[in-house]
């Protein structure tokens, strides 16, 4: 879908009930540094390197630390980051656009990168969260072995579940390095995914939000 297009209107969903809801994925307690470092050492041997030569001696530990950071969302939940909420009586659209994201394709374990646009309509009490928390929410789900579609739906479902929002929309535009640096090698190809929830299915609301997302 092009970001200029509207997601398909689904009149049956206008009551705010969506057919597919994703349970939050389990949070894994600890990153196993020693196991990751041992695996990297094995990988170096498999490609024909000498993991004991000077330049590589610390590499397994460094790469393990890097992966602990790059996949750190495995040890966090959306509930951890959407803790700060305020009831300020604003019950209309809140949209944060162009949130940079880096995630890790679960098929090749190479990055995909781009931007997320997140909009939601709070519940009637106006329960909202801090703007930075929306960017943190993206990171919780981006920093895992991922596919873009699941990342998109997990962010949207979290807003509905935790903030009890009346509607949510998440649009992600990303370039997958597995399509750029290897395989089909098509640099510049953008994948665009969207997830629409609750009253955001309303055609007028949604087209207003898409216009704001696409305004440059
Ligand atoms: N739907 C979806 N596909 C993805 C995502 N990230 C990577 N892929 C695709 O996952 C597919 C994996 O295909 P396979 O045929 O199993 O793996 P492969 O032989 O390495 O495929 P090529 O990338 O075509 O060389 C590829 O088509 C990737 O482009 C994603 O976020 N969503
Ligand atoms: Zn990939």
Image (tube, rainbow, N blue to C red):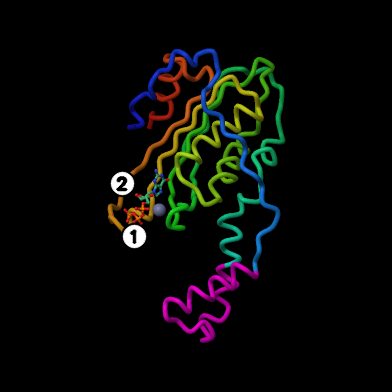
Residue stretch rendered in magenta on the structure: 34-63
Q: Residue at x 68, y 38 (%)?
A: 79
Quickly name the residue at label 2: 189
Quarter containing the N terminus: top left
Note whether 187 is above or below 57 in the view shown. Answer: above
Q: Residue at x 48, y 84 (%)?
A: 50
Callout 2: 10 Å neighbours few (<14), some, many (20+)?
few
Report whether 87 appears left or right of 197: right
Is label 1 in contact with label 2 (beta carbons under 8 Å)? Answer: no
Q: Residue at x 56, y 44 (%)?
A: 141
Q: Is residue 35 magenta?
A: yes
Q: Quadrant of residue 80?
A: top right
Q: Quadrant of residue 46?
A: bottom left
Q: Quadrant of residue 90?
A: top right
Q: Is residue 130 magenta?
A: no
Q: Residue at x 50, y 20 (%)?
A: 200
Main SS, magenta residues: helix
- The disc placed on residue 89 is none
- Which secondary structure, mark 2? loop
Does mark 1 have its CB less than 8 Å from ligand 2? Answer: no
Report whether 103 appears left or right of 184: right
Question: Which of 51/206 is in front?
Answer: 51
Task: Measuring from the top left, give residue 2's x and y in whole percent.
Answer: 33, 32
Task: Measuring from the top left, give residue 45's x and y in whole percent.
Answer: 48, 79
Quarter containing the C terminus: top left
Cα separation, mark 1 vs mark 2, equals 12 Å
- The disc placed on residue 181 is 1
- Which secondary structure, mark 1? loop
Q: How many marks?
A: 2
Task: Measuring from the top left, give residue 199's x and y in whole percent.
Answer: 52, 17
Task: Measuring from the top left, give residue 86's x and y in whole percent.
Answer: 71, 27
Task: Say which label, 1 or 2, has the lower sequence index.
Answer: 1
């Amino acid at each position: 879908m092009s970001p200029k297009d509207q997601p398909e209107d689904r009149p049956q969903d206008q009551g705010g009930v969506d057919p597919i809801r994703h349970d939050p994925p389990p949070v894994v307690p600890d990153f196993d540094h020693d196991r990751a470092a041992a695996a990297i050492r094995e990988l170096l041997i498999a490609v024909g390197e000498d993991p004991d030569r000077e330049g590589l001696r610390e590499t397994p530990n460094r790469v393990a630390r890097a992966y602990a950071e790059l996949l750190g969302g495995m040890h966090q939940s959306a509930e951890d980051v959407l803790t700060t909420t305020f009831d300020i009586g604003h019950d209309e659209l809140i949209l944060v656009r162009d949130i940079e994201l880096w995630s890790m394709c679960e098929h090749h374990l190479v990055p995909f990168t781009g931007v997320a646009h997140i909009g939601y309509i709070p519940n009637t009490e106006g329960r909202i969260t801090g703007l930075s928390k929306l960017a943190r929410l993206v990171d919780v789900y981006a920093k895992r072995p991922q596919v873009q579609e699941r990342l998109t739906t997990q962010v949207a479902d979290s807003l509905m579940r935790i903030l009890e929002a009346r509607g949510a929309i998440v649009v992600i535009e990303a370039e997958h390095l597995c399509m750029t640096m290897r395989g089909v090698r098509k640099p510049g190809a953008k994948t665009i995914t969207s997830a629409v929830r609750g009253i955001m299915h309303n055609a007028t609301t949604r087209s207003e939000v898409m216009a704001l997302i696409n305004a440059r």
